[in-house]
Amino acid sequence: MKEKRDKLIESLRLWLEKNDLTSETHFFTIEEWQEREEEYHTESQFVITTEGGLYYILNFGDEKQYHEFEDLVLSFGFFYELGNAWNIGFYYEENLENAPLEEPFKSYADKLRDRRWQNKRNLVKSRAGYRCQDCGSTKNLEVHHCYYQYGKEPWEYPLDTLRCLCRECHEKRGRLETVVRAKFADLRFNELEVLKKLISHSILAYNRNAFFEFLNSLGNVNGDMDKKYDEMKTINRFS
C-alpha cells in the first residue's frame, strides 16, 4: 500500500504542475496531519490542502479537470473525500472495482488487456469523440501515452496525458516525441524551465493557433516574425 500511495502522490504532484495548479496547494503525511489536530481525515493515508486552482475545481468548477483528478485517484485504488472545502483526504479501498491487484509478473501485453487499461482506453476515445486528436481520422484508433515513468502501470496515468490517435499519427508522434526528448539533452535545467513557462503562460495568455504560428515564424527567411507577433497580441485567445 505504501508503494501505491507514494506513486499516487507523485502522479498528483505531476498532474498539478502540468495544469499550473500548485499554487496554495500542500501535501501532508498522515503523521503531519495528525499533529495539526484537525477534525477530518485523521484515518486517511495522506491529505492535500488547497486554496488555489484545485480548490475551485473540486468545489465549483471545471468538470473536465474534476473528472481527470477523480480518475487519477481511482486508478491507484484510492478514493478521496473533502473534509472542509479546503482539505482532501485520500483513502485506500481494497473493495473498489479499480483496486490494484498484485500481479508483478504480467507482461506489458497482458497489462494492455487488463480491464483497468481497457476501461481507461475506452474513456480516452470517448472523450475525443472517437476521432484522432491530431488529424481527425476515425479509423484504427489507438491510445498514446505522451510519457512513461518507471514503475507505473498503463492505467496509472492522468487522462490529460493520454491521447486518442489513429495508427499513423501514433507512430509519427512516438518518433517525434523521442526526437524532442533527445534535443532536450542539449539544454540546461534553467533553459528547460524557460520552455515550460513559455508554453504554460503563453497558451493561457494568447490564442493557441496564433501563438504556435508565431513560434513557427521564428527564424523564417520570409521575415514574417513581427507580423505573427502582432497577430498573436491582438487576436482574442478565445476566438
Image: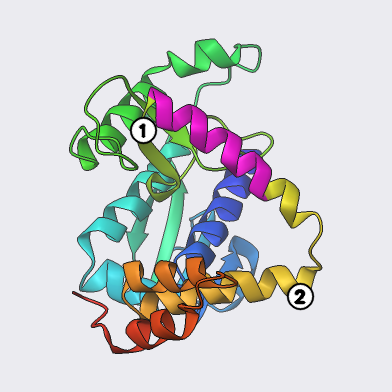
Disc 1/disc 2 C-alpha distance (Å): 32 Å
Give the residue displayed 48% in from the left and 41% down from the top. 157
Label number found at residue 190: 2
Q: Give the range drawn in magenta.
A: 167-180
Q: Quick check: 73 left or right of 45?
A: left
Choose the circle earlier in sequence order: 1 or 2. Answer: 1
Residue 39 seen anywhere in this rendered image of the structure: no
Q: Residue furthest front?
A: 222
Please name the amino acid that badge 1 sits on.
Answer: Leu
What kind of element bears circle 2? helix
Residue 14 vs 174, above or below: the answer is below
Image quarter in which the C terminus is found = bottom left
Residue 202 vs 216, above or below: the answer is below
Is 200 in the magenta?
no
Observer-nearest of 15 and 132 = 132
What residue is pinned by disc 1? 165
Residue 91: x and y, percent? 45, 49
Q: Using the rendered view, name the quadrant where residue 74 is placed.
A: top left
